[in-house]
Image (cartoon, rainbow, N blue to C red):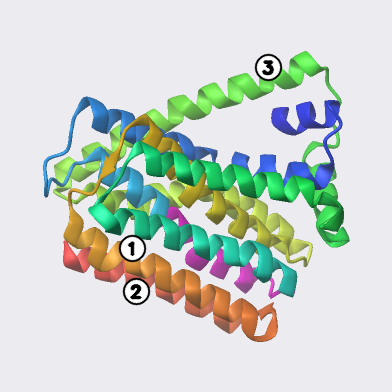
Amino acid sequence: EGAKGLARRVGIAEVIIGLTIVSLGTSLPEILISAQSSWEAMKNPCAVGATDCAADFALGNIYGSVLVQITLILGIVVLISPLEVRPAWIKRDGAMMFLAVIMLSMLVLVDGDLNRFEGGLLVLMYLLYMVYLIQNREKIRADEFEVIEEIRVETSGVLNWTTASYFSMLVIGLGLAMFASSKVVEAASSIAIELGVPSAAVGTTMSAIGTSVPELAVAILAAKRSTGVAVGTLIGSNITDPMFSVGIAALVNPITVSNSGLFYELIMPATVVCTAIALIFMWTDFKFNRPEGGILILCYLAFVALLYGAI
């Protein structure tokens, strides 16, 4: 609310607010948790093959968030309300989402880590994408503007506060989110140590589901209005996470995969394959129906079964 209020005060178009600030807002947990994990890894470097590595947790959280959102959450939304998908969504945002996942995976595969230069490259690409959206704001479809305007009225129409109030909301909200992210990292790391479960597995499941709750809430709200913005919300977040979130984490501290077997053999390929499946479902008839939503949910359940079977 604070970010959107400040944006309106300086005259930024509502559609751009939705595609940038709302996207960043729903991805804030992933951004903060990944950065916090990298900070913890810098203070306590990971040993190869260790199960309690914070860097593995950071990467696991990012890949897990993409996987959760594109399978479990999208599946739930589609079961609630089948969605129409416009070709332009796939050509622009869907392609960018798949490119983000592939590029992150290739950078990690090259040498088993993500250094500061590579992290900066991912952040730069994300910022260029934001610039592209702003420069082409007149070409953004009218229905996107209408839906985002409806959500704005639904969630914040009663607020008309001063600039100082909006700024205070933003600062307090970010402060609470940073505090919460540090507690999530501590709790998840403790669980991994106590149960002997790899940090990557915890980040891919429990933490990823927890940090994806904002996307679920926004997507369900949009689905109830029978619009395709639910798909756009999840796609937008899945562009932010593999580029901006993990890029910031790598800038804080280079990320090295310590539990490489689990990550390379299951987590990374499952995320790439499930992202491709979701895009194929979108492309076939430009609709998301309930059977396809059920298939996506089954894909995530199968992944969890394989993951914990491999531990």
Question: Which segment did they paint magenta?
Answer: 64-86
Q: In the rendered image, which residue does mark 3 sit on? A: 168
Q: In the rendered image, which residue does mark 1 sit on? A: 268
Q: Quadrant of residue 246?
A: top left
Out of 185 and 14, give the one closest to the viewer. 14
The answer to whether residue 85 of the structure is visible from this angle is: no
Task: Name which of mark 3 and mark 2 comes first in the sequence.
Answer: 3
Q: Main secondary structure of the magenta part?
A: helix
- Residue at x-position 84% and y-position 53%: 145
Out of 255 and 197, give the one closest to the viewer. 255
Q: In the rendered image, which residue does mark 2 sit on? A: 302
Q: Is residue 141 left or right of residue 253?
A: right
Task: Name which of mark 1 and mark 2 comes first in the sequence.
Answer: 1
> Given this view, does label 3 or label 1 mark the residue nearer the observer?
1
- The picture places residue 72, in percent across and down from the top left corner, at 49, 65
Distance from disc 3 to disc 1, alpha carbons, whole Å, reads 39 Å
- Residue at disc 3, secondary structure: helix
Task: Name which of mark 3 and mark 1 comes first in the sequence.
Answer: 3
